[in-house]
Image (cartoon, rainbow, N blue to C red):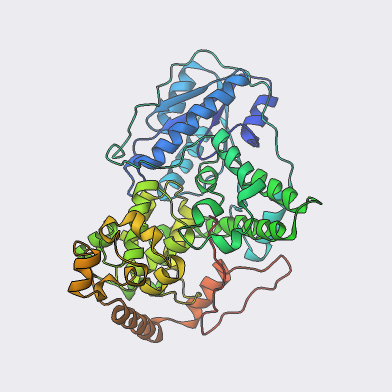
């Protein structure tokens, strides 16, 4: 009898419970990955994501070959792939990890479960994140997360029995869906080897000062762990990262400054799963506001010119445009700048959250649906339980890129403008532009201060007229954070509590 280990967002062999369980049976194993063309037609997928996966498939295949197996890649739907394998092999089981993805992957997983039941094939899932399926009480989530993180890391199996010959497809060169047009010159490289190398360099050197250096786009490139795409596609397990970070922080020779940095880093791993749990609990968040009454705050089509200028890095606000252009080129930007990009689109440009969220999703090599859609709504003021964060693009620029280094790198139009003028080039006189340059940089799409005031008033007025205590209480009860396993359930509040957490793992 044969076991299919279906790889999804878990492209590794170490700490891979389904693979270990299959190997321990001592029976033939088919290590399967399916290139699903329909998935790559979804509006939040992109070529940079697929390229990272291709790297990771190469690495995964090498790991499997060391254990005497190999990766089988098929193209089409998972049902078609399993049916093809069933016709040639006596498949008895399908083992895989749970996935908290968008509606498309949710429906796909349901169809696979139904197919297995129909054909009397055992289907078994394991949890790889601190996300609890069918969670009945949010108060117990923290305890469940901690218990999972403390479980032993599973070693990669030394031997994985190989099933009979199967003809797969070559995954290099394939560009499913609409990914071919996406070019990301400096995207991160996938694969477990690269992920483990990043983890080692972060724990040994780069983590010191983590909590202080992750906000500025100049320092965040090195200060952040840069593990986010590896966690998103499972080339390194979250549990292994957590345990190694804890061990490094608790080592007797570790200096206090490094200990504090690693404590901050581990808290981000916790928040990572906290936000994915929101989508697990309420899959509709991919399409609808978390606070249902706030969905009607913006109606009608988005202003196409404003949306396009924001997408192209042509808003006329230097830091905003530099962040967008950097993201287009590298596939990554730090959390603070992600939050600013989404907030600018939602408030100053007054765009409905969905279009900007989809655009950013496509640009993120590390796209993680649970974090992304929750954060997109949080930065757009649609949770009803978090304080509004309306970013001032000029002040953020002066604070986080005071000398204009990041701006000059990504906006060559402003390369010659001195630091004292680069944050607000629209205030330069014609003589100053003639002397320092900046004539070719686009004028701001609007007055950001005036737009921010109008947005704050519009949101406040809408909340007063349409937001109920009952719906706010429902959101808080279902999605509100808990400080720990002993905290009592929060009571619904007439006013949203402040949010003082940076809530995304970088």
Number of labels in the image equals: 0
Residue at screen point 54% across, 78% down: 498
Question: In the figure, 103 relative to 448: above or below?
Answer: above
Is residue 3 something that shows in the picture?
no
Question: In the figure, 181 relative to 263: above or below?
Answer: above
Viewer-proximal residue among 339 and 298: 339
Viewer-proximal residue among 155 and 425: 425
Viewer-proximal residue among 217 and 23: 217
Quadrant in the rendering for residue 393: bottom left
Q: Position of residue 397 (x, y in %)?
A: 40, 68
Residue at screen point 60% across, 48% down: 129
Q: Position of residue 233 (x, y in %)?
A: 51, 41
Quadrant in the rendering for residue 2: top right
Residue at screen point 59% across, 17% down: 162
Q: Is residue 469 left or right of residue 315?
A: right
Q: Is residue 283 left or right of residue 46?
A: right
Q: Position of residue 189 (x, y in %)?
A: 47, 37
Is residue 185 something that shows in the picture?
yes
Q: Position of residue 188 (x, y in %)?
A: 45, 41
Q: Quadrant of the N terminus?
A: top right
Residue at far top of view: 165
Residue at far right of view: 252
Question: In the figure, 190 relative to 265: above or below?
Answer: above
């Amino acid at each position: 009898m044969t076991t299919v280990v279906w790889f999804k967002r878990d492209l590794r062999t170490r700490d891979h419970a389904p693979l270990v369980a299959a190997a321990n049976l001592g029976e033939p194993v088919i290590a399967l990955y399916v290139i699903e063309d329909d998935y790559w037609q979804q509006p939040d997928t992109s070529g940079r994501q697929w390229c990272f996966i291709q790297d990771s498939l190469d690495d995964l295949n090498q790991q499997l070959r060391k254990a005497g197996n190999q990766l089988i890649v098929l193209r089409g739907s998972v049902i078609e792939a399993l049916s093809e394998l069933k016709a040639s092999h006596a498949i008895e089981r399908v083992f895989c990890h749970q996935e908290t993805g968008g509606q498309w992957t949710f429906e796909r997983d349901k169809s696979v479960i139904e197919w297995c039941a129909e054909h009397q094939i055992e289907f078994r899932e394991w949890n790889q994140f601190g996300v609890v399926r069918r969670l009945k009480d949010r108060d117990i989530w923290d305890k469940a997360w901690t218990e999972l993180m403390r479980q032993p890391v599973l070693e990669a199996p030394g031997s994985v029995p190989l099933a009979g010959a199967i003809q797969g497809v070559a995954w290099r060169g394939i560009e499913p869906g609409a990914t071919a047009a996406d070019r990301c010159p400096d995207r991160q490289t996938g694969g477990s080897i690269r992920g483990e190398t990043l983890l080692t360099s972060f724990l040994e050197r780069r983590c010191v000062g983590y909590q202080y250096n992750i906000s500025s786009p100049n320092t965040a490139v090195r200060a952040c762990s840069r593990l986010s795409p590896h966690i998103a596609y499972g080339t390194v397990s979250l549990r292994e990262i957590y345990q190694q970070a804890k061990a490094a922080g608790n080592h007797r020779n570790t200096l206090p400054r490094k200990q504090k940095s690693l404590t901050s880093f581990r808290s981000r791993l916790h928040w990572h799963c906290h936000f994915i749990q929101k989508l697990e609990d309420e899959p509709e968040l991919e399409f609808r506001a978390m606070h249902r009454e706030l969905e009607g705050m913006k109606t009608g089509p988005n202003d196409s010119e404003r949306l396009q200028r924001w997408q192209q890095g042509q808003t006329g606000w230097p830091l905003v445009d530099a962040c967008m252009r950097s993201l287009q080129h590298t596939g990554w930007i730090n959390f603070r700048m992600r939050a600013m990009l989404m907030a600018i689109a939602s408030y100053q440009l007054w765009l409905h959250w969905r279009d900007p969220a989809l655009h950013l999703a496509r640009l993120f090599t590390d796209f993680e649906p649970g974090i992304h859609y929750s954060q997109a709504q949080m930065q757009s003021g649609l949770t009803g339980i978090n304080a509004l964060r309306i970013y001032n693009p000029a002040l953020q620029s002066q604070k986080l890129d005071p000398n204009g280094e990041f701006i000059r790198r990504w906006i060559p139009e402003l390369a010659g403008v001195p630091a004292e003028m680069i944050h607000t080039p629209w205030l330069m006189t014609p003589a100053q532009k003639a002397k320092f340059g900046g004539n070719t940089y686009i004028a701001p799409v609007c007055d950001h201060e005036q737009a921010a005031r109008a947005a704050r008033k519009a949101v406040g007025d809408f909340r007063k007229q349409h937001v109920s205590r009952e719906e706010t209480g429902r959101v808080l009860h279902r999605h509100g954070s808990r400080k720990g396993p002993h905290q009592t359930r929060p009571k619904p509040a007439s006013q949203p509590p402040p949010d003082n957490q940076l809530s995304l793992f970088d």
